[in-house]
Image (cartoon, grey):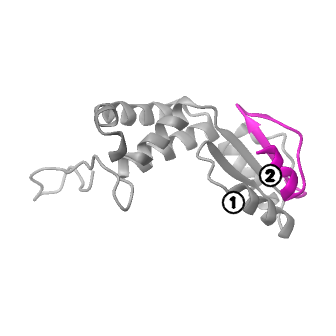
């Protein structure tokens, strides 16, 4: 939606049903809600994303190329996304994060676990409680089950 529902001069609310130069708000929202649901474990966020995907189901069936970003969200919803957790700070942690971002992996969530933000991150994502944030390392997880940590970009590249 591009306008608030209670606007006094509103005759109709437009709902974009195509991704153009910029993806439409519904496509972006569906993917963000799915990622947040994966991080936090909140099922209400996944349900909101599912509602959006269902609402645009007809468009996706009839004109799938009209909503490429929505297709990414549908793939994310149906797939097994990887959670990539980069712990620590400094140049080594930054190099690991660059490696995780280097290639297009639509089924990923990239999280940074730094010592100074650890308490807030664990509050939002309790499953990260056991992951230390004191030294640079990367963990690749699926369904919150993490492989052993790696410490170099080359090792991370192989793990991805």
Residue under numbered circle 2: 157
56 and 118: which is toward the camera? 56
Q: Residue at x 10, y 59 (%)?
A: 9
Q: Residue at x 24, y 48 (%)?
A: 15
On the image, the x and y values in percent for residue 46 come to 50, 33
Position of the C terminus by quadrant = top right
Residue under numbered circle 1: 102
10 and 120: which is toward the camera? 10
Image side of residue 29 versus residue 145, left or right: left
Q: Residue at x 49, y 43 (%)?
A: 72
On the image, the x and y values in percent for residue 11 come to 9, 52
The boundaries of the magenta stretch are 133-160
90 and 44: which is toward the camera? 90
Q: Is residue 12 above or below residue 129?
A: below
Mark 2 or mark 1, earlier in chain: 1
Q: Is residue 122 visible?
A: no
Looking at the rendered structure, which numbered label has been put on residue 86?
Answer: none
Q: Residue at x 47, y 35 (%)?
A: 74
* Label 1: how many Cα within 10 Å (few below 14, some 14–19, many 20+): few
The secondary structure type at the circle numbered 1 is loop
Q: Is residue 12 above or below residue 153?
A: above
Image side of residue 63 versus residue 73, left or right: left
On the image, the x and y values in percent for residue 32 come to 50, 47
Q: Is residue 141 visible?
A: yes
* Label 2: how many Cα within 10 Å (few below 14, some 14–19, many 20+): some
Q: Are marks 2 and 1 in contact (CB under 8 Å)?
A: yes
The secondary structure type at the circle numbered 2 is helix
Q: Reply yes or no: does residue 155 show up in magenta.
A: yes
Q: Reply yes or no: does residue 145 show up in magenta.
A: yes
Image side of residue 18 versus residue 94, left or right: left
Q: Is residue 126 above or below residue 104?
A: above
On the image, the x and y values in percent for residue 124 come to 65, 44
């Amino acid at each position: 939606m591009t306008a608030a529902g209670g606007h006094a001069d509103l005759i109709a609310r437009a709902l974009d049903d195509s991704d153009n130069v910029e993806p439409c708000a519904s496509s972006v929202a569906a993917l963000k809600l799915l990622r947040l649901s994966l991080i936090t474990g909140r099922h209400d966020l996944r349900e909101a994303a599912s509602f959006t995907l269902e609402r645009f189901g007809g468009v996706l069936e009839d004109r799938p190329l009209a909503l490429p970003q929505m297709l990414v969200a549908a793939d994310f919803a149906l797939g097994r996304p990887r959670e990539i957790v980069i712990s620590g700070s400094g140049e080594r942690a930054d190099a690991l994060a660059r490696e995780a971002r280097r290639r297009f992996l639509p089924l990923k969530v990239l999280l940074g676990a730094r010592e100074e933000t650890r308490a807030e991150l664990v509050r939002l994502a309790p499953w990260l409680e056991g992951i230390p944030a004191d030294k640079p390392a990367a963990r690749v997880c699926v369904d919150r089950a993490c492989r052993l940590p790696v410490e170099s970009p080359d090792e991370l590249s192989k793990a991805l």
